Image (spheres, rainbow, N blue to C red):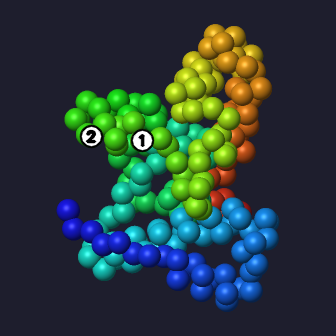
Amino acid sequence: INYIVVNIDEICDSFVKSLSIDPGDARVKMPLANLRARVRMVILYFYANLYNYLVAGTSDKSEYLIGFFTKYGDGAADFFPIRHLYKTQVRELAAHLGLPERIVRKPSSPQLYPGHKLSDELPVDYSVIDSILIGLLEKNLTCEETSRVLGIPKEIVEDIFRRHFKSMHKRLNPPMIKDKK
């Protein structure tokens, strides 16, 4: 596999400088983190365009359903080979394919900024999230039923449900004005 490593720090720094943004301002922490994901996607599409390639998305079903991706960043791609699989299923597939243990067991991390950990944003790990999503979206259970069946506090189930609901805009095409004709 041919690949190159592109350091995007200068690109992102230039953006910050051009807009006179104070990177220490707490309000810009996530917008700047999402900027990094979007810059990566711009670079991927540059090379896809240059070589007539398609961009493969890396989001799985768990990330997709709770909106744990950057709109027009890692959420942009030409096809999504694992989006139909929950995070736990991706790990099972990796083990089945014989990938190295360090990859199969690698903790999930969004890595949008130095030291960024999954636990900074999500209340539980993906094995729990996957069970909750299956209960709510595949078995059509209520939050209360999902909590009871799985033995998970209702507040956590409601948190995952809220994430799914609030991220709906990321999973839909942008609306358009329809002609009256």
| Crowding at mark 2 (Cα within 10 Å: few <14, some 14-19, many 20+) | few
Which residue corresponds to mark 2? 100
Q: Position of residue 131 (x, y in %)?
A: 55, 23
Q: Position of residue 144 (x, y in %)?
A: 74, 16
Q: Is residue 113 above or below residue 8?
A: above
Q: Amino acid at mark 1?
A: Lys
The image quadrant of residue 125 is top right
Residue located 36% across and 57% down the image: 56
Quadrant in which the C terminus is drawn: bottom right
Out of 131 and 14, give the one closest to the viewer. 14
The disc, 1 or 2, on the residue closer to the chain's N-terminal end is 2
24 on left or right of 151: right
Residue 117 position within the rendered picture, expressed as x and y whole percent measured from the top left: 59, 48
- Can I make out residue 181 in this image? no
Up-down relation of residue 161 to residue 71 (above or below):
above
Q: Is residue 104 above or below residue 172?
A: above
Q: Point out which mark residue 106 bears.
A: 1
Residue 49 at what x, y percent from top left?
A: 34, 76
